[in-house]
Image (spheres, rainbow, N blue to C red):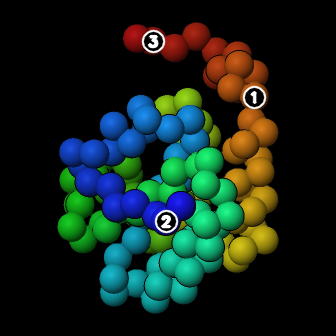
């Protein structure tokens, strides 16, 4: 599956529609972002069961601000609509694959128990 572009309007729906969503926050002027793009796209092709989204931080400044993006590229991963990974910097293919497997194997019940009670 190819990557999809996500906007402020489609972000919540994207999380709602998929168990696992990776989000690459990037910009066209960012050299490391351009270097990471083929690695990210190849991972999307290898893992059709995961949604691989991209957010152009120039076009989606409000969404980038809401996600507290201070450095790009930043990769975030959500499982069951919960943020389980966030890291700035471009990953190589091996590093990205390790993150993908860790997210796939994450036990959400265990993570929620570790987080403790949440104020709603």
**Counting residues from the N terminus, which is met first, the one under dot 1 or under dot 3?**
1
Disc 2 and disc 1 in contact, CB within 8 angstroms: no
* 2 or 3: mark nearer the eye: 2
Q: Is residue 71 visible?
A: no
* 2 or 1: mark nearer the eye: 2
Front in this rendered view, residue 56 or 14: 14
Mark 2, residues whose alpha carbon is within 10 Å: few (<14), some, or many (≥20)?
some
Residue drawn where x is 24% and y is 71% of the image: 58
Query: Can you say whether 58 is above or below 106 in the image?
Result: below
Residue drawn where x is 49% and y is 32% of the image: 81
Query: Can you say whether 110 is above or below 1 in the image?
Result: above
Query: What mark, if any, has residue 2 been given in the picture?
Result: 2
Q: Which quarter of the figure is the C terminus placed in?
A: top left
> What residue is disc 3 on?
119
Quadrant housing residue 93:
bottom right
Query: What mark, if any, has residue 29 been given in the picture?
Result: none
Q: Is residue 113 left or right of residue 6?
A: right
Q: CA distance from mark 1 to mark 3?
A: 21 Å
């Amino acid at each position: 599956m190819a990557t999809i572009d996500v906007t402020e309007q489609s972000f919540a729906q994207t999380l709602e529609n998929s168990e696992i969503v990776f989000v690459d926050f990037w910009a066209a002027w960012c050299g490391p972002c351009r270097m990471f793009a083929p690695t990210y796209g190849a991972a999307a092709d290898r893992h059709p069961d995961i949604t691989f989204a991209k957010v152009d931080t120039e076009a989606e400044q409000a969404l980038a601000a809401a996600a507290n993006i201070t450095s790009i590229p930043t990769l975030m991963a959500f499982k069951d609509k919960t943020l389980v990974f966030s890291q700035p910097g471009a990953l190589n293919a091996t590093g990205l694959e390790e993150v993908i497997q860790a997210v796939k194997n994450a036990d959400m019940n265990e993570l929620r128990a570790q987080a403790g009670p949440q104020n709603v």
